[in-house]
């Protein structure tokens, strides 16, 4: 736990129990940036009570030095660098190095890092056969969960993460192989031959090559499109303790191997409230269909009795414009301009929807702004990706964040297994009921038809 004692504050927080008249002092730990935290680790021992915080809305589950977010100001920094600066000046592999190692690389280190990553881009050939076990219509995220999990069955020489060398090889393998795995999931779904990686291409260009090239034709792609893909990966590289990253950390806290942990992260990312939102945004824009239908959908989103939500809007942490969304919006314009698709009807609906929502009292009051997913789907669709691939692209960008957070946790000397407590609201102790006296349950009605 980095600098914990240095950051301990002289101040404390007093808890008073009205029932017993006892008070308890809780130490306060100062963050380098952002809010201080109450150290409640001894709370149960001293008071016999747990805290209750479903969804971790007020709970710091770990300390970390990788990513900082100020949701009210709309700030996102990796290792101290603003996301706008990284998105404007850094290529993705440089950001990978930064997240993994803490600083931007020197030119020599950058070259070395690129060489190391290139060295691992291929998949074990037997692993390639694994794809054929999936149905053709399998969702590519299902394939991702399966194939990434299966890496642990193939790379035994990098699963002992107590060894720093094996740990680093696992990190490099995951960053290097994830585009290959994602591109192959796509190729399999459309029945085209797998395209093996080309190490003379950049990370983003190689991914586009493996995804869109065919053996019969020369592969050509514009620099601007490669840049947009690279920037997409930069914008998704890490986002502190979100659901999938917390899943990776929780899985890793038990000592599970890194490949299994990242597979768990991919599963968590798949949900529509998290990484699946970019796919949901396009479905929603298509469903809206025309600018004139926007008010109807805005009303649906505001209706408490309607489960519909504006996809790509709102965020647990950002109560301001998601800084990634502004870069993504800019990038969407650049890509559509490059592809001569500026009159894209979905872009028009998205821009108008954003305009209307940002002026609407409901969205203003609840501080609901566009998030990273709002414009990313438009870019990906324009590039030719089917919607089912959108979350795969998120996963490719996020793998470095997951593995950096996992590495940070493993290297923390006081790493403990993650084991949340609960507020139990079920039955208290009761006598065992004989089978003959048990009632038929209405929830099983469908069984008795
Ligand atoms: N449309 C309409 N109302 C919304 C929306 C939305 N997109 N998001 C939140 N609200 C309302 C919600 O109904 C609730 O109202 P009330 O207080 O009256 O019950 C209030 O705003 C707070 O919402 P919440 O669900 O308690 O907030 P949360 O922090 O638990 O959820 C969220 C955050 C991202 C899951 C949610 O905003 C959402 O479902 N957004 C749409 C899905 C989406 O775009 N997800 C991508 C997130 S960014 C990518 C990533 O990091 O994975």
Image (tube, helix red, strand yellow):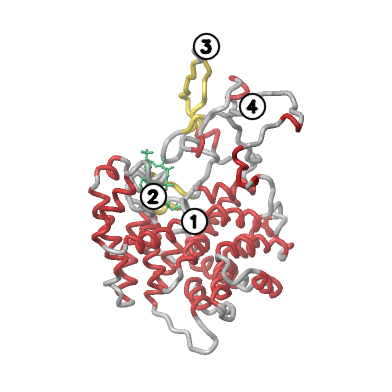
Q: Which residue is mark 2?
A: 308
Q: Which residue is mark 1?
A: 103
- Disc 2 CB within 8 Å of nearest ligand 1 atom: yes
Label 1 Cα neighbours within 10 Å, binned few <14 / some 14-19 / many ≥20:
some
- Report the quarter where the N terminus lies: top right
Answer with left or right where residue 256 lies relative to residue 334: right
Q: Residue at x 30, y 74 (%)?
A: 341
Q: Residue at x 32, y 41 (%)?
A: 366
Q: Quick one: which residue is furthest to the front in this view?
A: 449
Q: Give the label on residue 404, or none.
A: none
Q: How far apart are labels 3 and 4 at the CA level?
A: 25 Å
Looking at the picture, does residue 96 appear above or below residue 407?
Answer: below
Q: Residue 371, position in %: x, y?
A: 37, 53
Instruction: Indicate the secondary structure of the residue bearing disc 3.
Output: loop
Q: Residue at x 49, y 19 (%)?
A: 15
Q: Nearer the viewer, mark 2 or mark 1?
A: 2
Instruction: Indicate the secondary structure of the residue bearing disc 4.
Output: loop
């Amino acid at each position: 736990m980095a600098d914990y004692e240095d950051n301990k504050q002289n101040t404390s927080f007093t808890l008073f129990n009205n029932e017993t008249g006892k008070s308890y002092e809780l130490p306060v730990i100062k963050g380098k940036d952002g809010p201080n935290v109450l150290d409640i680790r001894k709370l149960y021992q001293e008071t016999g009570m747990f805290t209750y915080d479903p969804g971790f809305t007020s709970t710091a589950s770990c300390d970390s030095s990788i990513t900082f977010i100020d949701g009210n100001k709309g700030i996102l920094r990796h290792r101290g660098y603003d996301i706008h600066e990284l998105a404007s000046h850094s290529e993705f592999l440089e950001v990978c190095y930064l997240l993994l190692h803490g600083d931007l690389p020197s030119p020599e280190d950058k070259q070395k890092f690129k060489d190391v990553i290139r060295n691992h881009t291929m998949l074990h050939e037997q692993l390639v056969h694994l794809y054929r076990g999936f149905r053709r219509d399998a969702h590519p995220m299902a394939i991702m969960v399966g194939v990434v999990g299966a890496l642990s069955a193939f790379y035994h020489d990098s699963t002992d993460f107590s060894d720093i060398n094996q740990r680093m090889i696992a990190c490099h393998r995951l960053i290097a192989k994830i585009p290959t795995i994602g591109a192959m999931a796509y190729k399999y779904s459309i029945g085209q031959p797998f395209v093996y990686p080309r190490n003379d291409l950049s990370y983003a260009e190689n991914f586009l090559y493996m995804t869109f090239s065919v053996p019969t034709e020369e592969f050509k792609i514009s620099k601007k499109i490669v840049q947009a893909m690279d920037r997409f990966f930069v914008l998704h590289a890490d986002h502190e303790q979100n659901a999938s990253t917390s899943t990776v950390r929780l899985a890793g806290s038990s000592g599970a191997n890194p490949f299994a942990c990242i597979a768990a992260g991919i599963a968590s990312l798949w949900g529509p409230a998290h990484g699946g939102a970019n796919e949901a945004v396009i479905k929603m824009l298509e469903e809206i269909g025309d600018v004139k239908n926007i008010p109807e959908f805005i009303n649906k989103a505001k209706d408490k009795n309607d489960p519909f939500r504006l996809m790509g809007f709102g965020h647990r942490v950002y109560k301001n414009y998601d800084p990634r969304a502004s870069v993504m919006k800019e990038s969407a314009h650049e890509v559509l301009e490059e592809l001569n698709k500026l009159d894209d009807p979905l872009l028009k609906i998205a821009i108008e929807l954003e305009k209307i929502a940002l002026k609407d009292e409901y969205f203003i009051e609840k501080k609901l702004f566009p998030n990273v997913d709002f414009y990313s789907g438009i870019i990906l669709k324009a590039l030719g990706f089917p919607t089912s691939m959108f979350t795969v692209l998120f996963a490719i960008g996020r793998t470095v964040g997951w593995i950096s957070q996992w590495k940070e946790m493993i290297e923390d000397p006081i790493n403990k297994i993650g084991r949340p407590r609960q507020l139990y609201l079920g039955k208290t102790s009761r006598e065992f009921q004989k089978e003959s006296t048990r009632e038929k349950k209405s929830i099983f009605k469908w069984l008795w038809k």
